[in-house]
Protein backbone atom coordinates (compact mmCIF):
# COMPACT_ATOMS: atom_id res chain seq x y z
CA UNK A 1 0.00 0.00 0.00
CA UNK A 2 2.89 2.36 0.75
CA UNK A 3 4.20 2.03 -2.79
CA UNK A 4 0.80 3.07 -4.16
CA UNK A 5 0.82 6.15 -1.94
CA UNK A 6 4.30 7.05 -3.21
CA UNK A 7 3.16 6.62 -6.82
CA UNK A 8 0.17 8.86 -6.20
CA UNK A 9 2.31 11.48 -4.49
CA UNK A 10 4.81 11.56 -7.36
CA UNK A 11 2.02 11.75 -9.93
CA UNK A 12 0.42 14.66 -8.07
CA UNK A 13 3.79 16.42 -7.69
CA UNK A 14 4.49 15.95 -11.40
CA UNK A 15 1.11 17.48 -12.26
CA UNK A 16 1.69 20.40 -9.90
CA UNK A 17 5.15 21.01 -11.37
CA UNK A 18 3.67 20.97 -14.88
CA UNK A 19 1.02 23.53 -13.90
CA UNK A 20 3.68 25.73 -12.28
CA UNK A 21 5.95 25.43 -15.32
CA UNK A 22 8.86 23.87 -13.40
CA UNK A 23 10.45 21.69 -16.08
CA UNK A 24 13.18 20.13 -13.90
CA UNK A 25 10.62 19.14 -11.26
CA UNK A 26 8.43 17.54 -13.96
CA UNK A 27 11.41 15.46 -15.10
CA UNK A 28 12.41 14.46 -11.56
CA UNK A 29 8.87 13.58 -10.42
CA UNK A 30 8.13 11.71 -13.67
CA UNK A 31 11.19 9.53 -13.10
CA UNK A 32 10.13 8.86 -9.50
CA UNK A 33 6.59 8.04 -10.65
CA UNK A 34 7.88 5.51 -13.18
CA UNK A 35 10.10 3.93 -10.52
CA UNK A 36 7.06 3.62 -8.25
CA UNK A 37 5.11 2.03 -11.08
CA UNK A 38 7.91 -0.48 -11.60
CA UNK A 39 7.65 -1.44 -7.90
CA UNK A 40 3.90 -1.95 -8.32
CA UNK A 41 4.49 -4.10 -11.42
CA UNK A 42 7.07 -6.20 -9.53
CA UNK A 43 4.58 -6.68 -6.70
CA UNK A 44 2.06 -8.06 -9.20
CA UNK A 45 4.64 -10.11 -11.17
CA UNK A 46 4.01 -8.02 -14.29
CA UNK A 47 7.06 -7.77 -16.54
CA UNK A 48 7.68 -4.19 -17.77
CA UNK A 49 7.75 -5.53 -21.34
CA UNK A 50 4.02 -6.31 -21.08
CA UNK A 51 3.28 -2.70 -20.11
CA UNK A 52 5.38 -1.25 -22.94
CA UNK A 53 3.80 -3.71 -25.42
CA UNK A 54 0.33 -2.60 -24.34
CA UNK A 55 1.28 1.08 -24.70
CA UNK A 56 2.68 0.41 -28.18
CA UNK A 57 -0.50 -1.48 -29.16
CA UNK A 58 -2.65 1.46 -28.04
CA UNK A 59 -0.49 4.00 -29.87
CA UNK A 60 -0.60 1.98 -33.08
CA UNK A 61 -4.40 1.60 -32.84
CA UNK A 62 -4.75 5.33 -32.21
CA UNK A 63 -2.53 6.20 -35.20
CA UNK A 64 -4.51 3.83 -37.42
CA UNK A 65 -7.82 5.39 -36.37
CA UNK A 66 -6.37 8.85 -36.96
CA UNK A 67 -5.23 7.91 -40.49
CA UNK A 68 -8.58 6.33 -41.30
CA UNK A 69 -10.33 9.52 -40.21
CA UNK A 70 -8.37 11.66 -42.67
CA UNK A 71 -10.23 12.68 -45.84
CA UNK A 72 -9.34 10.54 -48.84
CA UNK A 73 -7.18 12.05 -51.55
CA UNK A 74 -9.71 12.00 -54.34
CA UNK A 75 -11.73 14.53 -56.26
CA UNK A 76 -14.34 16.51 -54.43
CA UNK A 77 -17.90 15.29 -54.81
CA UNK A 78 -20.59 17.95 -54.66
CA UNK A 79 -18.22 20.49 -53.12
CA UNK A 80 -16.97 18.30 -50.27
CA UNK A 81 -14.71 15.32 -49.85
CA UNK A 82 -16.38 11.97 -49.36
CA UNK A 83 -15.33 9.76 -46.46
CA UNK A 84 -15.79 6.04 -46.43
CA UNK A 85 -16.44 6.27 -42.68
CA UNK A 86 -15.65 8.62 -39.83
CA UNK A 87 -14.21 7.97 -36.39
CA UNK A 88 -16.14 9.89 -33.76
CA UNK A 89 -13.66 9.64 -30.91
CA UNK A 90 -10.04 10.44 -30.27
CA UNK A 91 -9.90 8.28 -27.13
CA UNK A 92 -7.32 5.54 -26.99
CA UNK A 93 -8.81 2.05 -26.77
Image (cartoon, rainbow, N blue to C red):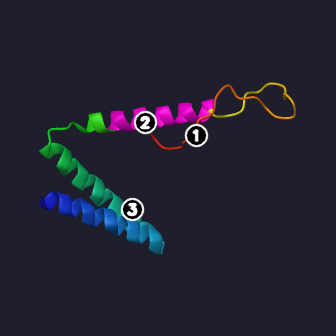
The residue sitting at the bottom extreme is 20
Asked whether the beta carbons under mark 3 and mark 1 sit within 8 Å of each other, the answer is: no
Residue 61 falls left or right of residue 87: left
Q: How would you rate the neighbour count of disc 2 (Cα within 10 Å): few for under 14, some for 14-19, many for 20 or more?
A: some
Is 3 included in the stretch rendered in magenta? no
* Residue at 87% in and 34% down: 79
For mark 1, give the secondary structure. Answer: loop
Q: Is residue 53 above or below residue 36?
A: above
Front-most of residues 73 and 36: 73
User: In terms of sequence position, does the residue under pointer 3 or pointer 1 come before the other?
Assistant: 3
Q: Nearer the viewer, mark 2 or mark 3?
A: 2
Say which quarter of the image contains residue 75: top right
Question: What whole-number distance in Å separates the C-alpha atoms at marks 2 and 3?
Answer: 24 Å
Residue 90 lies left or right of residue 70; in this view the side is: left
Residue under the image location 22 percent in, 55 percent down: 36
Where the N terminus falls, by quadrant? Answer: bottom left
Which comes before the other along the chain, label 2 or label 1? 2
Residue furthest right in the image: 79
The residue shown at (38%, 38%) is 55
Which labelled disc corresponds to residue 88? 1
The total number of labels drawn is 3
Amino acid sequence: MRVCQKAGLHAANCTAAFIAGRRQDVIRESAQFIRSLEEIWRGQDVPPEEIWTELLRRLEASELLHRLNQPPHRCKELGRRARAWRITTSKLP
